[in-house]
């Protein structure tokens, strides 16, 4: 029987058994609406409040600074559009990076159609934004800087603490400027502390940390004005209308609690698996090029270009043999364009087209690497032979 190996945990993770156990009662007998004042509603309200504390604790926030959303995309949209619309009297300029997730990039592009203007900062050859470029891009019209904590394709960790300090120092002089970071890939893989970062807004997604899809959160520092995007009832302190998804929120809270308790051990384990895979690929497959910074990166992501082949062809070949990987962000799959993240590293299209992302999770084992290395070298060799014969 085909042994399947899942190495696409940056796209989504399986739900942890402890998380399923926590959410199940709220899918069955604990079904109340948190806005109801009777027993069933207050039972659900207490569960949502507990989860809010659990999410806040993971990132060192206050519970009332957590706004539950439908996921990371909504959190990013709410942060950027909500901040821009609530504060456009102070300016209409936004700064972001060239390697942001589409949930940031596309909302910025949409705002450009509404008389906002956006600066897309380049990154260096390792995929890191230069702090001096951020500083140079700030103008009197700048109201928001949005730079991700860690990249979803190559795992590089951005200098968000330094950016946060810069923004705070400007605000101390009376400037109306705020800082948002998309921490969807970073949370649960590395320490994320909103006070250390100094951010005003931070996005999280549950399904990246072994909880269900369809729930996430936006951290919004006290005093930050946001224009609501979901207009409805009084939920989420009137910042986001709509009945809360109690089972998903409970699951999210439990996943955050587990992530905080296991962070150091989990990071070390993921790093060992990633490094073993990279070392063995380097020993067995010629012309394999590693993308991103070798040190300043998440512990679970390896992004590798296999020269002279198409990444999509290799992905399909591996999938047919039971190995699940990706060529980049799951939200960008289906496009024929080379990875814009790899292209942004001052690299050519060949390197971008041949890139594969391997991303590990808590349920991976060393046997998964063994199986991958049984398949990968031959797959690369065969595809290179076909490409050379064209």
Image (spheres, rainbow, N blue to C red):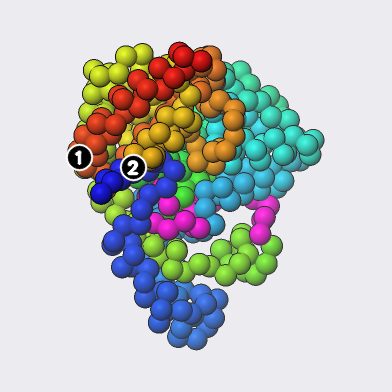
Secondary structure beneath dot 1 equals helix
Query: Relative to 159, does residue 79 appear above or below in the rendering?
Result: below
Quadrant of the image occupied by residue 99: top right
Residue at 63 percent across and 21 percent down: it is 137
Q: Where does label 2 land, which residue?
A: 322
**Between disc 1 and disc 2, whose residue precedes?**
2
Circles 1 and 2, Cβ within 8 Å, touching? The answer is no
Question: On the picture, is 223 further left or further right than 161?
Answer: right
Q: Characterize the magenta stretch by its predominant secondary structure.
A: loop
Q: Position of residue 206 (x, y in %)?
A: 43, 53
In-front residue for pair 378/131: 378
User: Over which residues does the magenta segment extend?
Assistant: 207-230
Q: Callout 1 environment at 10 Å: few (<14), some (14 to 19), or many (20+)?
A: few
Question: On the picture, is 116 further left or further right than 212?
Answer: right
- Report if residue 180 is visible in the image: no
Quadrant of the image occupied by residue 195: top left
Secondary structure beneath dot 2 equals loop
Question: On the picture, is 74 further left or further right than 298?
Answer: right
Q: Distance between the residues labelled 1 and 2?
A: 13 Å
Query: Relative to 15, does residue 329 appear above or below in the rendering?
Result: above
Q: Where is residue 140 in the image (x, y as percent from the top left)?
A: 70, 27
């Amino acid at each position: 029987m085909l042994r399947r190996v899942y190495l696409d945990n940056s796209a989504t993770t399986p739900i942890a058994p402890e998380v399923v156990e926590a959410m199940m009662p709220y899918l069955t007998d604990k079904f109340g609406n948190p806005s109801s004042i009777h027993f069933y509603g207050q039972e659900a309200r207490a569960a949502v409040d507990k989860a809010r504390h659990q999410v806040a604790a993971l990132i060192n926030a206050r519970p009332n600074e957590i706004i539950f959303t439908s996921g990371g995309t909504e959190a990013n949209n709410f942060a950027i559009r909500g901040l821009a619309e609530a504060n456009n009297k102070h300016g209409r300029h936004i700064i972001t990076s060239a390697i942001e997730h589409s949930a940031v990039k596309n909302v910025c592009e949409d705002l450009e159609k509404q008389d906002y203007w956006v600066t897309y900062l380049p990154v260096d050859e390792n995929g890191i934004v230069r702090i001096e470029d951020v500083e140079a891009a700030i103008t009197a019209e700048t109201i928001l800087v949005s730079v991700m904590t860690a990249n979803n394709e190559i795992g590089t960790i951005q200098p968000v603490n330094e950016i946060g300090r810069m923004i705070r120092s400007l605000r101390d002089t009376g400037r109306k400027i705020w800082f948002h970071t998309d921490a969807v890939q970073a949370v649960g893989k590395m320490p994320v502390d909103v006070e250390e970062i100094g951010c005003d807004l931070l996005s999280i997604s549950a399904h990246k940390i072994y909880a269900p899809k369809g729930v996430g959160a936006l951290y919004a520092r006290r005093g930050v004005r946001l224009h609501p995007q979901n207009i409805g009832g009084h939920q989420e302190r009137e910042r986001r209308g709509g009945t809360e998804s109690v089972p998903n929120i409970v699951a999210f809270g439990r996943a955050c609690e587990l992530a905080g308790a296991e962070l150091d051990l989990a990071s070390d384990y993921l790093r060992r698996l990633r490094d073993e895979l990279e070392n063995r690929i380097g020993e067995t497959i010629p012309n394999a090029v590693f993308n991103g910074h070798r040190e300043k990166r998440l512990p679970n992501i390896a992004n590798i270009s296999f020269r002279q082949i198409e990444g999509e062809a290799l992905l399909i070949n591996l999938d047919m043999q039971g190995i699940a990987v990706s060529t980049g962000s799951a939200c960008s799959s289906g496009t024929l364009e080379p990875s814009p993240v790899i292209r942004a590293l001052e690299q050519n299209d060949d390197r971008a087209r041949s890139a594969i992302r391997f991303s590990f999770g808590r349920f991976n084992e060393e046997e998964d690497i063994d199986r991958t290395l049984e398949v990968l070298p031959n797959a690369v060799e065969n595809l290179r032979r076909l490409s050379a014969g064209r």
